[in-house]
C-alpha cells in the first residue's frame, strides 16, 4: 500500500501536476467513482473523466485511441497525471496510454478489484490485447501482446472499494494472493487457506493484501523486466492460461449456437479461477518432478473444490490445451512447454521444461477431482 492514502498526501501529490485526469469504466463509474471522489474531496466538474465500456473485450487499441483523444482534447501536457480507477483492464490500459502519450506522462492506480489491488495495479506491466489486422475475424486477440514497462507513481489501495465487488471477482483476486503465498512459505499459505473470505473490510484482510503486494514488489524490484526471477509469478499460469483461452474459445463458439443448444455451455471463467485450476495441476507437476509433498497437492485441491469448483475441462480437452501451451510466449524454443514450478512451498524454480506425458498426467489428475 502507499503513503498517499490520506487526503493531504494525495492532494500534495496532485499539486505537483498541471492537470489531473481520470480514467474509469462504466461499471466502476457507478459503484466506485462517487466513493473515490468523495474520499479525496474531488468533484467531477473539476476532474475531466473518461468513462469507457467495461470488460476485457475493450482492452484494445481503439480504447487507447479514445484515451489519447481525451487527453489531447482536455489539454493534458507532459506534466499531467492520469488516475486509473478500476480493475486490471483499466489499470493496464490507462498505464499504457499514459506511458505513450507525449512519450510518457505519470499515472496513478486506484484499483477497485482484488485482482488489481494485489497484482495488476503494481509491477509496471502495462498494455492491451492485440488483434493483427490480417487476422481480424479469424483468431482471437493476443493477450497483453502490446505494452510497455512503466511503473505508476502511486497505487492507492482502499478496502472500502471492495464492498460492491461480486464474490466471483473476489475469489479471482484471492487466487493470485494464494499464488503469492505458496511462493513465499507455509505460514503465508496456511493463513490464506484458513481465512474467512466473508471478512474483507477488516484490518486483518488489509494486512493480507499488504503482504501480498509487498511480496510482488520485492520480486519485481529484483527483476523489473521479467528476465528471470519474476517468472516465478507465472506459477499456475502455463496451464491456467491454456484453460482460460480454451474456455473463451468454447464460450464464443457456443454463444453462436441457438439457446436450446447451449443449455450445458461452459462459460468463460474469471482469470483467477483458471489460475487456481492451473496451480493445482502445476502443484501436481511439482510433486511429480520435484517431490513436492503430496499433502500440499491434496490441501490445495480441496481448497479449489470448496471455493472454485471442479475445473471446467475434461480429458478430451487435452490436445487443445497442449496446442495452446505450445503457443505460450514464455516458451523460448519452439515445441517445448516451460513452467515455473515449486520444489516445495516457498521454493520456486523457473524455466522447467515439461514433457507431454507429465502434462497428461497432471491434466488427468485435475480432471479427476
Ligand atoms: N499488469 C499486470 O501485472 C497484470 C496482472 C494480472 C492481471 N492483469 C490484467 O488484469 C485484467 C483483469 O483484471 P480484473 O480481474 O480486475 O478485470 P476487470 O478490470 O475487467 O474488472 C472485472 C469487472 O469488475 C468490475 N468492477 C471493478 N471494480 C468493481 C467494484 N469495486 N465493484 C463492482 N464491480 C467492479 C469491472 O467493471 C469489470 O466489469 C486482465 O486484462 C489481465 O491481463 C494485469
Ligand atoms: Zn494472473
Image: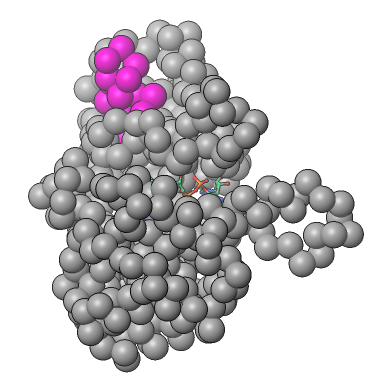
Residue at 34%, 24% (x, y): give it.
Answer: 98
Residue 188 seen in the current view: no
Image position of 204 with respect to 246: above or below: below
Q: Residue furthest left?
A: 222
**What is the residue that sits farthest to the right in this orientation?**
260
Viewed as shown, does residue 20 lie left or right of 181?
right
Q: 149 left or right of 254? A: left
Count the numbered circles shown: 0
* Residue 213 visible, this orientation: yes
Foreground of the two, 125 or 121? 125
Q: Residue at x 29, y 82 (%)?
A: 287
The spot of residue 246 in percent (x, y) is 56, 56
The magenta span reads 96-108
Image point (57%, 73%), residue name: 315
Q: Is residue 336 magenta?
A: no
- Magenta-drawn stretch, dominant element (helix, strand or loop): helix
Give the camera-side residue of 77 and 168: 168
Residue 205 placement (x, y as % from top left) = 35, 68
Of the pair 347 and 31, the residue shown nearer to us:
347
* 336 lies left or right of 220: right
**Which of the two residues, 261 or 3, is positioned nearer the viewer here?**
261
> In this image, 322 relative to 147: left or right?
right
Residue 103 within the magenta-colored segment of the rendering: yes
Q: Position of residue 164 (x, y in %)?
A: 56, 56
Question: What residue occupies the far bottom of the structure in this picture?
Answer: 295
166 w.r.t. 367: above or below: above
Identify the residue at image location x=85%, y=59%. 261
| Horizontal and vertical percent position of residue 267 | 66, 59
Amino acid at each position: 500500500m502507499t503513503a498517499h492514502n490520506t487526503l493531504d498526501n494525495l492532494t500534495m501529490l496532485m499539486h505537483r501536476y498541471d492537470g489531473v485526469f481520470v480514467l474509469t469504466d462504466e461499471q466502476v463509474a457507478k459503484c466506485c467513482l462517487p466513493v473515490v471522489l468523495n474520499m479525496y474531496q474531488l468533484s467531477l466538474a473539476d476532474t475531466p473523466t473518461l468513462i469507457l465500456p467495461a470488460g476485457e473485450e475493450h482492452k484494445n487499441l481503439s480504447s487507447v485511441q479514445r484515451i489519447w483523444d481525451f487527453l489531447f482534447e482536455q489539454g493534458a501536457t507532459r506534466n499531467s497525471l492520469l488516475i486509473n480507477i478500476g480493475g486490471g483492464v483499466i489499470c493496464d490500459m490507462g498505464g499504457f496510454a499514459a506511458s505513450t502519450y507525449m512519450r510518457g506522462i505519470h499515472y496513478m492506480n486506484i484499483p477497485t478489484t482484488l485482482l488489481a489491488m494485489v497484482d495488476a495495479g503494481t509491477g509496471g506491466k502495462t498494455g492491451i490485447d492485440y488483434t493483427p489486422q490480417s487476422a481480424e475475424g479469424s483468431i482471437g486477440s493476443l493477450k497483453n501482446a502490446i505494452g510497455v514497462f512503466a511503473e505508476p507513481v502511486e497505487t492507492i489501495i482502499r478496502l472500502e472499494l471492495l464492498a460492491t465487488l461480486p464474490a466471483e471477482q473476489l475469489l479471482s483476486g484471492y487466487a493470485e494472493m494464494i499464488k503469492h503465498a505458496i511462493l513465499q512459505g507455509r505460514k503465508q499459505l496456511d493463513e490464506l487457506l484458513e481465512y474467512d473470505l466473508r471478512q474483507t473490510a477488516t484490518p486483518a484482510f488489509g494486512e493480507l493484501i499488504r503482504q501480498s503486494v509487498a511480496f510482488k514488489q520485492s520480486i519485481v524490484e529484483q527483476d523489473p523486466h521479467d528476465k528471470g526471477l519474476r517468472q516465478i509469478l507465472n506459477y499456475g499460469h502455463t496451464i491456467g492460461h491454456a484453460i482460460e483461452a480454451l474456455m473463451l474459445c468454447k464460450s464464443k463458439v457456443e454463444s453462436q449456437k441457438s439457446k436450446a443448444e447451449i443449455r450445458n455451455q461452459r462459460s468463460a471463467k474469471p482469470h483467477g479461477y483458471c489460475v487456481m485450476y492451473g496451480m493445482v495441476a502445476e502443484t501436481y507437476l511439482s510433486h511429480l518432478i520435484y517431490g513436492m509433498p503430496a499433502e500440499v497437492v491434496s490441501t490445495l485441491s480441496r481448497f479449489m473444490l470448496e471455493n472454485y469448483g471442479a475445473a471446467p475441462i475434461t480429458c478430451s480437452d487435452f490436445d487443445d490445451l497442449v496446442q495452446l501451451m505450445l503457443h505460450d510466449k514464455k516458451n523460448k524454443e519452439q515445441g517445448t512447454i516451460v513452467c515455473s514450478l515449486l520444489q516445495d512451498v516457498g521454493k520456486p524454480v523457473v524455466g522447467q521444461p515439461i514433457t507431454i506425458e507429465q502434462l497428461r498426467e497432471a491434466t488427468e489428475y485435475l480432471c479427476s477431482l
